Amino acid sequence: MGTTQLETVPEPKYWHLRNVLGEALDSEFHVGEILPNERDLAARFGVARATLRQALEQLELEGRLQRRRGVGTTVAPPRLGVDVSTTHAGGPGASDDAWQPLDCTAAVPPAAVARLLGADASAEVHTIRRVRSTQGQCVAAELLYVPDASVPDLSAIDAPSGPARARSVLRELQRSGIEGQDRSVELGSARADDAKELDRLPGAPVLVVTTRYLAAGRTAAVSVATYRADTCRLTFGDAGEVEISEEPARAAS
Amino acid sequence: MGTTQLETVPEPKYWHLRNVLGEALDSEFHVGEILPNERDLAARFGVARATLRQALEQLELEGRLQRRRGVGTTVAPPRLGVDVSTTHAGGPGASDDAWQPLDCTAAVPPAAVARLLGADASAEVHTIRRVRSTQGQCVAAELLYVPDASVPDLSAIDAPSGPARARSVLRELQRSGIEGQDRSVELGSARADDAKELDRLPGAPVLVVTTRYLAAGRTAAVSVATYRADTCRLTFGDAGEVEISEEPARAAS
DNA sequence: GAGTGGTCTAGACCACAGC
DNA sequence: CTGTGGTCTAGACCACTCT
């Protein structure tokens, strides 16, 4: 009949758009270039703006686009490889890492963290807030929970809070001898405070890295670090130097 | 004045909804329970369905809800801890893993994979498709790229494709002696074929684990595995047995 | 102020599961 | 068949950045 093989797999418009735009990014755009605005793009493809936005959201999730309110949509650079390997990091306070402590307070940890610490759900622990920067970019925000038992020699004379306090706790934690750690990675969405540090809107996709630091057979500390999922690629082992990408190489136009 | 401190931080409706629904999930629902349908929920909260859906999408992304077309929205169980640690896996063909080979063909790998393999971008390699199941659930789909040089003794008499061929290649790869591996994890969206294996729609969020297998100082094989981001928590080290969750413990109703 | 992306609305129709 | 979530539309207004 007249219909060759229609009606099979009616691909969603936004998915088709994603593919078309993705190919256009490969062949017709270079990193940093500004795309036409959403209203123009939607009109050009003959779809509603909401549909066009669905496609852009996909591409942003995949780290291929960057969108900033009031500015525009640009072609994103390849994702940064961020090393989170066990062997490289000497512990939560190793001297050469790119973490910067912001604050340290005493607070009751979330129930899930308390469970990992094996402590009372209502007991206060040292709670350190840090951010990690790589190449001038803030890529992660972390909350590090350290029970008092893990830093027995902490001087009570030091400042009760602030970056100086954080450094004291980290130093003592290092001194107590971290023997090992285990990690897990999962997808999450940025809470309001994390989003602020990461310069994203609340709800932005993040990779949540939960680390348990072990000392003397016990859990000495627990860290919950949120990495920007759009711009980061977490590396384990020595693959950090190699460029790994899901997409085919971009042809220069 | 009359205004106490209004106009500050007008939280988006969908974000507020996410929080309200999240708390409701903690206190009023148990795993597997069916939520009211989207139209009812939207009406109940006095918002448009699209706005309500934005909140549900967030919660689904965080692994707290499961939505199935034609069925409804249910409360998701805690994420499965899936071990992807270096020490545990003896290589891509270890006997006790839960991977199931589906097929094996000769194909030209994506440019990014060819770069990792250090081979010609146009050279064909053995391309094995596998899926990983845990507790009856298919949690990952993988493409494993093996250059011919890594399996020199592969019998040309075996079937040229299919699961049997895949097992032959895996066996030979094991025999060649894998010495190490390095990995990276990043966020991606499921391609059409992966989505089918994972029982998701195209574009569903996935954690892409790229592994480089090393033998004799060279890259012997490259694997690109996509894990369901909504249901999986990737674990490294021996944290697999511990329940790690970003959310506070659910109170039984 | 002009222009951008972000949020929100109130509808419509479609694809799919289960009866 | 009914009911569900998935897609799509054509608007509106808001928050933000830059000039």
Image: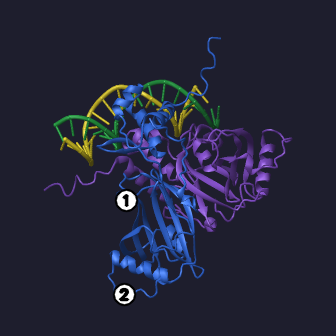
Chain colours: A purple, B blue, C yellow, D green
Q: Nearer the viewer, residue B18 or A151?
A: A151
The x and y percentages for residue B244 are 55, 50
Query: Real-space Cα distance between discs 1 and 2?
Result: 34 Å
- Please state the chain letter of the residue tagged with numbered disc 2 in the rendered image: B
Viewer-side label of 1, 2:
1
Q: Residue at x 60, y 50 (%)?
A: A116
Mark 1: which secondary structure?
Answer: loop
Classify residue B48 as left or right of residue B233. left
- Numbered tag placed on residue B156 in the rendering: 2
Residues at marks 1 and 2 on the same chain:
yes
Please state which amino acid type lies under the numbered disc 1.
Gly
Q: Nearer the viewer, residue A38 or A242?
A: A242
Asked if residue B3 is positioned above or below residue B96 in the image, the reply reads above
| Quarter assignment of residue A212 | bottom right
- Please state the chain letter of the residue tagged with numbered disc 1 in the rendered image: B
Location of the N terminus of chain B by quadrant is: top right
Mark 2: which secondary structure?
Answer: loop
Residue labelled with disc 1: B136
